[in-house]
Structure formats: structure tokens, C-alpha cells
Amino acid sequence: DTGVSQNPRHKITKRGQNVTFRCDPISEHNRLYWYRQTLGQGPEFLTYFQNEAQLEKSRLLSDRFSAERPKGSFSTLEIQRTEQGDSAMYLCASSSYLPGQGFGLTYEQYFGPGTRLTVT
Amino acid sequence: AQSVTQLDSQVPVFEEAPVELRCNYSSSVSVYLFWYVQYPNQGLQLLLKYLSGSTLVKGINGFEAEFNKSQTSFHLRKPSVHISDTAEYFCAVRESSNFGNEKLTFGTGTRLTIIP
């Protein structure tokens, strides 16, 4: 178990450019979450996947944002035409969801170190 | 929908003194409760969680928390803090359902600073 990894760790981009982040979850985890954390705030939910299906998107996720998880393993989060308000830490988390398993491991999300985006 | 309030944005504490970080939540449905810690330039690490049963839960690094349903609180405590406890602490909630989105709703965090 190598944990959740995210790349890059830091990204500086100019306003109007597109950026893409990658998240590699824990290998046996079928659920993957994206959160955004701005300065002085707690993480806010953006979207989540179960296997390759994107099951829910927050209204925070504008049309400029798109997330994919094509083979149910790693996921990418793309932001098009970045704005200064997109500057934040983007966190990825994964979990193992097994319906009917009951209490226990299904309820823990393991977080990656995050990608810090700065839009100048 | 759920919400979480962490009233204390910063808490300075002398080393080896006790500490309590406060968390209150609001929800129209039953919830599970969590405390996460975030060290500088790192992701979130789960300290402890309350799912059901005993209202006093123990976590890693000597932390514990008590669920109080009537006061809708889940305060985090440690009897004696160390320099290494300096970090940001987040309280979080999610719906207590076995199905659907397990998204977490976080508070704004409390920065714990240990004074030598």
C-alpha cells in the first residue's frame, strides 16, 4: 500500500491556460473523490467516481472543470481557461466501497498530499 | 445537507498541557463524525471517527473525542500535547448511510500551535 499519490505537487500557471492534475488512488479502492481547499477553509467536495462512473458533481464544479477516471484506476482533473479564483489546493481521496459490508473500512477516505495550483 | 462549525480558528497551547478543539455540527439526518489532521504540505490523515456505539472514541496519537447528540458536538481532546501535534485539525461529517455518496463536509479548521 503506497497510499494515494497526486501529480504535480505544485503548479503555477497564467490566467487563461489549461491545467491537468492526476490522482493515483490506493490500488484496490473503487471510489475516488476530488476536493478543493482554499486558504483558511476546509476541503470542499467537487466530484466522485465509483470505478469509472462519475456519480455526482458539486455545483462548485463549473463547466470549465472536467474529471475523468477512464479505466477505474487513476483520475484526472482538468481546468480550462483558469481564473485567479481557481487558485487552491486540490485534494484527491480514495476509499473501498462494498455495499452491505457494514461498518469499518468503507467509511475511511485516504487522502493524497494534494496539488497546489497558483493562477497568476 | 450538513454543516460543521469550528469556532476556534487558532489555539495556542503550552507543551504538556491539555487541549480541547471544539466542533459543532448541523444535520437533518443522522451522521458519522470524523477528525482529520493536516501537517504542513501534506494531505489529511484520519485521527478518529464516530460511527455508532460508545460516544467516547479514541484515535491515534493519544487523541480522543466525545459525541454529544443533544448538543450536536464532537469535541477533540488530548490530555498532554507535544510539539509534534502542531498542525491543522479538521472536523468532518457525512450522512450515516450505507449507500450513495460518502462525501465529507468539513469545518474551516483549527490551527493548533504548541508553545515550548
Image (tube, coloured by chain):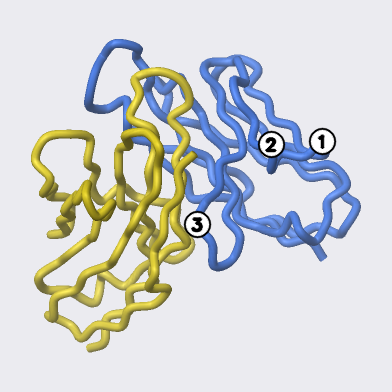
Chain colours: A blue, B yellow
For mark 2, what is the residue?
A: A77
Q: Quadrant of the C terminus of chain B?
A: bottom left
Q: Are marks 3 and 2 in contact (CB under 8 Å)?
A: no
Q: Amino acid at mark 3?
A: Gly
Residue in view at x 55 percent, y 47 percent: A44
Amino acid on which the number 1 mark rests in the picture: Asp
Q: Circle 1 — which element?
A: loop
Please tell me if label 3 and label 2 are on a single chain: yes
Q: Amino acid at mark 2?
A: Leu
**Disc on the earlier residue, 3 or 2:** 3
Image quarter of residue B6? bottom left
Mark 1 vs 3, N-terminal side: 3
- The disc label shown at residue A63, or none: 1
Q: Residue at x 19, y 49 (%)?
A: B67
Q: Chain of mark 1?
A: A
Residue corresponding to mark 3: A42
Q: Is residue A108 above or below residue B68?
A: above
Q: Is residue B13 left or right of residue B92?
A: left
Q: Chain of mark 2?
A: A
Q: Mark 3, residues whose alpha carbon is within 10 Å: few (<14), some, or many (≥20)? A: many
Q: Nearer the viewer, residue B71 or B77?
A: B71
Measured Cα–Cα span from mark 1 to mark 3: 23 Å
Q: Position of residue A103 (x, y in %)?
A: 22, 24
Neighbour tally class for label 1: few under 14, some 14-19, many 20 plus, Cα within 10 Å: few
Q: Residue at image x 42%, y 53%?
A: B4
Judging from the image, what secondary structure is the residue with disc 2 in? Answer: strand
